[in-house]
Image (tube, grey):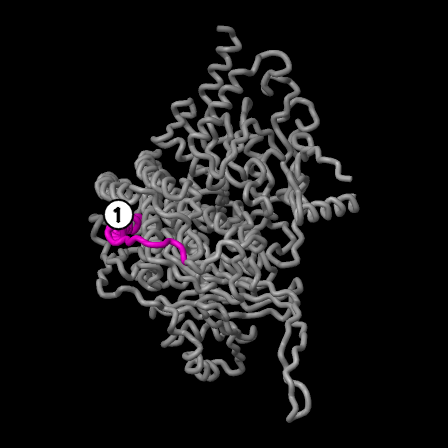
Amino acid sequence: MSLNEIYNWGRSNSVWPLQFGLACCAIEMIASTMARYDMARFGSEVFRPSPRQADLMIVSGTVTKKMVPQIVRLYNQMAEPKYVIAMGACAISGGPFKQGYNVLKGIDRYIPVDIHLPGCPPKPEALIHALMSLQKMIADQPLTGEGRPRHLKPEGASEFPIPHQGEQDLEPPCNPHIWRPPAIPRPVTA
Amino acid sequence: MPSHGGATAKVPTEAGAPRGPDAYRLTAGDNEYDDGSLLEISMGPQHPSTHGVFRMDVVLDGETVVKLKPVFGYLHRNHEKIAESASYLAAMPYTDRLDYFCSLTNNWAYALAVEKLAGLQVPERAEFLRVITAELTRLQNHVCLAGFLMQDMGASGTPLMYGFREREKILDLFEALTGARMMCNYMRFGGCRCDTPPGWLEEVRKVVDRFPRFLDEFENLLSSNEILMARTQGIGVLTRDLAINAGITGPVLRSCGVDYDLRKVDGYGLYPKFQFRVPLGDHGDTYDRYMMRILEMRESLGILRQALDAIPEGPILDPKSKLRGFRPKPGEAYGRIEAPKGELGFYLISDGSPNPYRYRIRPPSLINLTVLEDLCLGHNVADTVTILGSIDIVLGEVDR
Amino acid sequence: MAATGDSAAGHRLNLDPNEFGTTSESSASVETLEQILPRMKVAIPGVTFEVVPNSAPGAEPSWLVDREHALSAAFFLRDDSTLRLDYCSNVTGVDWPERTIKVKVRKGEPGAEKEVEETRVVPGYLEVVYHLYSMAAKHGPVVLRVRTPGRGNDVSLPSLTPVWRSCELQEREVYDLFGVHFENHPDLRRLLMWEGFKDHPMRKDYVPPDDYEYEPTPHDEILEKAQARLARREASS
């Protein structure tokens, strides 16, 4: 057993999520902690109400523009190492409510997301799969070199600017260092 | 805490946002509150005991609530605006996401409004299926509500676990019938989407037969529990006249003694055919609201048994209803049902096009919150959480 | 705040085996309007009343009241001993922008009149619709409509919150999303959007912010909209 493996074994098997449910996906998140799909078996024994004590923020539900400053603030208050699972279609990209004027088209516009979990809502088994993928991701992180986790990098950013609620929209509409609209290669039409 | 270097790794500058202490001050202008002895706290939007992203700005004198202003809108998903650019049928999955615990009753309310708008008839088997699914929804909603109320009071999730255990059994039934656990999207205009799989009704009967034993165990543990009684009796008393004037509906209204249950008053669907009683409360306090849900669960079991005995064979969709190209004639309709939270209504204005001209949802949770301040004044901060839990809100419905 | 002893003492069950529910929607129809209207004209001098027909099959006609007398009409409807409409169920805002409608008009000399279709421009207005029921007498609904004089940014209507408290939050929402100011509302602030927001999103001419930076598979109308959006963005940048 190398030091890397032991270090990551401790980290990945005790990921404590933040009590953070926004909308319908939150109910499936709660259901996944209940007796049938018990998520505590995987190390997420307690959902901490305080961001200081939590490792994982499961953004479950639609992110509205009114709520975004609070979410980014909470993310900033979490202590490193911290991870984000974007649970459900709404947190990934706006979901069914994508046309809405008050809906943010995905929380990854402002904070870095580690695992995207599609579904509307994803079943509790899917959430457990996402948690297990996160645990695998954590267990695979090396301690040195380029791929090392953010909390071991001296220049790793752990706090992100909070958008300001302007007159029509959030300012800025996204954090350009984290998210850019994907360049989709389109066939050239004559 | 500043982090190290990097373009994004600055201390977040909140330029422009909170514009000084007056921005959130509720008490600006009330000179009596300016002596600094009162504490103004903001409970939410992320808080372990608010039911979703809901914020309450509370002004406290010690531990006693002096003023309380709820703040909504953190889950405002523009359902009404989206529905204006979507067809009538495309708005049906959005109704699932309104009160996300009770997607089937939301579907029914919308289907009822559209059927009134377009003049569609529902065949009998579909009506029975609607009643069965609605009462199952009511059961799982009320049992989860009791669980969440206990959780808010500090029971650390054990009653919630019991409640969710029963809810999982009902969700399995929904998954077998509609294909989804929560967002069922089952009702259509003029009936239901699909018929029951073989053996489904027997499974429902098994769940319904085992439920009273679970309810007895639940009540044994909770209803005469000293802590529950001490923390809820006499707390958050709602008077009859205020309740009627403030438009409160549902179990909250009936806990004040007002006999207004839409299943009896409007007699929509097949409810006139079923024998059931409407529980009423005497005191209007939190304990009464809790007991309303327990008693309503028992009545729902009675309705379910009657429906399972009487359900006929037959079609489940009105042959005149069109799934594609549905264009109701110009006009308007208001359809309402007794959802587990209260009166859920849909007001639709049609101008003859495939999309609604105006699509309005009458949200029971939002209207029930009108009296939150009145109920909480004079009580402790811990009681606000209990009172909010007993009013039973779901933010998807409050904010739409 | 003392805890009462017996937990089951306060709960009566309302046993009504013979009341299998009544449809409540027939009571306040146009027919009874003829009986109510003279009473109302006596109680509120100067009120103008118009019945707006509803051509849907479930037809509930609605009553249009002028805005100067809306508050007195509301008090009358609530306090009248036959109507007793003590429960305001729903408050809706509707935006009617300016539209042209076709009207059949009889034109020509007397004796040789013909029906001609004319187009008329109906000026735009905002409308608030109240659905009223009676919990005391278990009938309803009575649909009350009030219209604003125009669609500008400072249109106002009297608030019916002094009559029915259930209008309080719903009128705040109509103010937030449509821009109708309610006079004498106890606390008129935005409900759903944040405080600095400047628009009224549910209006028909609202332009949503441009935060749709990419469209995965645009085609047909969506492609046209995406191209228009891109052109607007390039023109402004």
- Choose between B113 and A63: the one closer to the eye: B113
Where residue B374 appears, as percent x and y from the top left, is 41, 55
Q: Position of residue B195 (x, y in %)?
A: 36, 48
* Chain letter of disc 1 in the image: C
The boundaries of the magenta stretch are B290-318
B301 to the left or right of B84: left
- Judged from this view, the residue extending furthest toward the bottom is C111
Q: Is residue A166 inside the magenta stretch? A: no
Please identify the quarter of the rendering in which residue A71 is found: top right
> Is residue B94 shown above or below B332?
above
Q: Nearer the viewer, residue B199 or B27?
A: B199
Category of crowding for the residue at label 1, using alpha-carbon neighbours closer than 10 angstroms: few (below 14), some (14–19), many (at least 20): some
The answer, for residue C200, to whether it is visible in the render is: yes
Looking at the image, which residue is at 57% across and 34% down? A73
Is residue C217 rendered to the left or right of residue B66? right
**Residue labelled with disc 1:** C3
The foreground one among B306 and A86 is B306
x, y (%) of residue B191? Answer: 40, 55
Outermost residue, top direction? A1
- Mark 1: which secondary structure? loop
Q: Predominant secondary structure in magenta?
A: helix
Placement of B286 over or under C112, stated as above or below: above
